[in-house]
Image: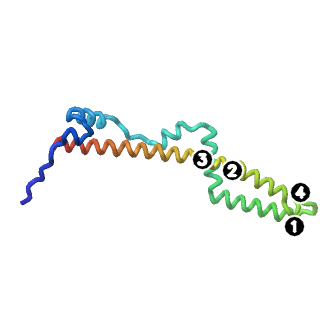
Amino acid sequence: MNQPRQVPAPTPSSHHGLSQDEVRALLHQLRERRITRNVNQSFAERLTFGQRMSDGLARAAGSWAFILGFSGILAAWVLINARLLAKPFDPFPFILLNLILSTLAALQAPIIMMSQNRQAAKDRLQADHDYEINLKAEAEIAGLHLKL
């Protein structure tokens, strides 16, 4: 009733035209190759000072602390110029504030884009690493299959 299932031996045609000796050699090489590594650490080691700086700025600009702090600065600017000063340095239409905000947006956008591009490169590196691990696992399974 519960007889072990017979698994047919792999044929050369099932391994993309490779002979069993070639398959064994390939599997041995895949098994011996160490592929575990910290992708985040290896990626971070290659970053330049400017890249680390832009990542830090993008991280800071995307935080609640930045949003709340910047909102406080804007509210203080408007309050000081609209109510507290007899002779405001930036009267009501707040042209100077508009210039500062436009400049900030013009500088902040490319910095965030650079950071996102680096994150995409890091994600691709992680995907390649995952593929290598999956390939090695598949080779191990194929090796076990050959031993059966």
Instruction: Determine whether label 1 and label 3 are within 8 Å by CB.
Output: no
The quadrant the C terminus occupies is top left
- Disc number lying in front (2 or 1): 2
| Distance between mark 4 and mark 1 Cα atoms | 12 Å
Q: Which mark is residue 108?
A: 2
Residue 131 drawn at (x, y percent): 38, 45
- Disc number lying in front (1 or 3): 3
Q: Residue, x 43% and y 46% (percent of image)?
A: 127
Q: Amino acid at mark 2?
A: Gln
Q: Which residue is mark 1?
A: 83
Judged from the image, the secondary structure of the residue bearing numbered disc 4 is: loop
| Distance between mark 3 and mark 2 Cα atoms | 11 Å
Q: Which residue is mark 4?
A: 89
Mark 4 residue crowding within 10 angstroms, few (<14) / some (14–19) / many (20+): few
Question: Would residue 23 be found to the left or right of residue 44 on screen?
Answer: left
Q: Which residue is mark 3?
A: 115
Which mark sits nearer the N-terminus, 3 or 2?
2
| Distance between mark 4 and mark 3 Cα atoms | 36 Å
Residue 86 drawn at (x, y percent): 93, 63
